[in-house]
Image (cartoon, rainbow, N blue to C red):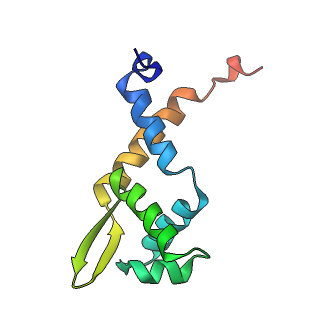
Amino acid sequence: MKKLELFDDKQQEIASLAKALSHPARIAILQFLASTPTCISGDISDYLPLSRTTVSQHLKELKSIGLIQGDVEGLKIKYCLNKEGIEKLNHVFGNLFDEITPSDNKIC
């Protein structure tokens, strides 16, 4: 049995989303995409102090978790936020923070 199997699906989902957000470049990419309606991947590497290859790896991670989506336009891929993925992120983390907020009588 893998250690991950000891945790429920909800805990594993939260951990996967947190892992996708665990690099500052990915946060910067999400913020950049939120500030523009759509974006060609080359534009993102111009915005960040990272190579196109590195940005591409971060985009792949964000896309695999469903936070962004990309559409092929000729030789370029146009990336944007995935509304459903971002709503899910807000919901999952909102619920988590509600669950772990201590009540006044439980604060040490």
Picture coordinates of residue 85 (x, y %)?
A: 33, 53
The image shows residue 55, relative to residue 7, as above or below, that is below
Residue 76 vertical position relative to residue 11 in the rendered view, above or below: below
- Residue 26 in percent (x, y) is at 52, 61
Which of the two residues, 37 or 99, is positioned nearer the viewer here?
37
64 vs 24, left or right, is: left
Residue lying at the far right of the rendered structure:
108
Q: Is residue 104 above or below residue 63?
A: above
Q: Quadrant of residue 39?
A: bottom left
Q: Position of residue 17 (x, y in %)?
A: 44, 44
Figure check: 20 above or below 28: above
Instruction: Report the quarter where the C terminus lies.
Output: top right
> Which of the image's four quarters has the N terminus?
top left
Q: Which residue is at 54% across, 75% downward?
A: 51
Count of numbered badges drawn on the protein: 0
| Viewer-proximal residue among 84 and 49 | 49
Q: Nearer the viewer, residue 18 or 94?
A: 18
Left or right, 74 with respect to 19, comes to left
87 displayed left or right of 44: left
Residue sitting at x 45%, y 62%: 57
- Which residue is found at the position 47% from the left and 78% from the top? 44
Q: Quadrant of residue 105?
A: top right
Q: Which residue is pictured at 44% across the width and 28% down the height?
A: 11
Provide residue 60's location: percent of width, then percent of height: 38, 60
